[in-house]
Image (cartoon, rainbow, N blue to C red):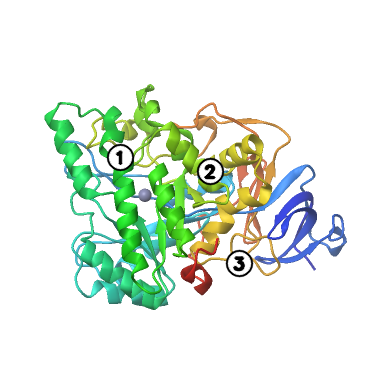
Amino acid sequence: MLDIVVTGGTAVLPSGPQPADIGIEGEKIAAIGAPGSLAALGGRVVDATGQIVIPGGIDPHVHCRWPMPVPGQTQPNMTDGPDRVSQAALFGGTTTILDFALVDGDNTVQQAIERRQKEWGGDCYCDYAFHTMVQGNLEHTVPDQLAEAVAAGHPTVKMFTTDITPSRKGRMVPFGSIWEVLKALAKSGGLAAIHAEDNDLVMHMYEKLTREGRTSFHNMAEVHTTLSEDLAFNRVIRLAANIEGSALYMLHTSAATGVRAIATARNEGVPIYGETLHQYLMYSAEDYKRPNGQIYHTYPSLKFAEDHAALWAGTNHGAIQTVATDEICCPLKFKLQGNRIDDTTGGNAGVEPRVSLMYTETVEKRGYDLGQFVNLISSNAAKIMGLYPRKGALAIGSDADIVLLDTRQRHVVKAAEMHEADYSPWEDRDLAAWPSVTVLRGKIVVEKGALTGALSDGKHLPRKVADEIRSRPAV
Ligand SMILES: [Zn+2]
């Protein structure tokens, strides 16, 4: 007896797209059959005729309820919480988000994770997990704590190779400590997620542009440069390549140099994966000149036309495996509060349009097959982050996270009609699809433009990265 049958759509299965019915029992996918074959097995029928049926999107890089420094103010503002971001995610066809548990103050890694879990419990509409994030000078016991966290189901650790801006001092993890963490992760089954920029070059450019009086954010790409990405990516790659079992995930790759560094390492068999952001694929440093140009920015920085070309090539079975948002959901007035190279707010609102934007840009505009589109917005993240095949697959036994992507009519992005911020960097974009139904673990959570899910629906997901992912470039 099935609870729900999704019938009549084109289902993007791990083997490829095909017309198929999907049967849901409880929280899981229980049956996949020929079109029309499952409706007789009972349950509610969801008509997907003319629509594409995909596994729920996975955004591997979001920040909810995150402190946002305010120029001239000691207390930071907080960005919107998981309650808001997860609602937007579900409306946009994303059913799992990965945020960060920051190890700060005197907290141990375990305490930091527990605190974040407590904060999110009952406050998230979709499923979630946390990358552990360590920063600054690390106590010598931290690598062991991280290894313990890996064993407890938190296998990914974020580290910065830069302070990003002079005002954010304390983010950078000294390279020796990164080395120790990579060794601990290699032994325990973890994966390092790196924000890689060359701190010396970045800080040099802050000094230089400040001296020259060129501190407007319009010059951001002169500070966070393609050369910096080249040096930092290659440095951390060489470090990892010298540690048996070390695997890397390069966060928000923004430049052709980063793409090339990942591609070269993958060709040598290094288990390394590339993430980019949809704004890095679609906006360039030229867009900083537009009205409210900060809304296109996130750190490191927007780059140039040749970087777009390399990033797009990377998404086509190349060095880029995932497209994330680096979500920072906040009102426009907060996003615009800084306008200098050292105080502009990073991140931006984008979790809601991400899946449909990527469908439009990959399948419609660039002729990607549906399988490759689904890999970029869901399956690859599930595999790399240790959630597959529970997440990221329309397969028997997988969680019934299912999205009906309606391609029968076009959809114009309007912040006022979405559930994120009061602005969108994607305002007025003409999209070829929009989700009509979102199912989270067997429960219909968005239907006919209305939220039917609850804040208690989201569950924390323990994770384990497969040996295959950690031993070679497996996706
Ligand atoms: Zn981020």
The CA distance from mark 2 to mark 3 is 27 Å
Residue at 67% in and 41% down: 448
Going by the image, does 449 lie left or right of 337?
A: right
Q: Circle 1 sits on which residue?
A: 225
- Ranked by sequence position, the earlier of labels 1 and 3 is 1
Mark 2 surroundings: few (<14), some (14-19) or many (≥20) residues within 10 A: some
- Residue 302, x across and y down, in percent: 37, 36
Residue at 40% in and 62% down: 248
Amino acid on which disc 3 is placed: Pro
Displayed quadrant of residue 435: top right
Question: Vertical placement of 334 versus 198: above or below?
Answer: above
As drawn, the label of residue 313 is 2
The CA distance from mark 1 to mark 3 is 37 Å
Amino acid on which disc 2 is placed: Ala
Q: Circle 3 sits on which residue?
A: 389
- Residue 51, x across and y down, in percent: 74, 44
Q: Nearer the viewer, residue 317 or 28?
A: 317
Quadrant in the picture for the C terminus = bottom right
- Whether residue 463 can be seen here: no
SS of the residue at dot 2? helix
Q: Cβ–Cβ below 8 Å for labels 1 and 3?
A: no
Going by the image, does 24 lie left or right of 199?
A: right
Going by the image, does 331 lie left or right of 27?
A: left
Going by the image, does 331 lie left or right of 312?
A: left
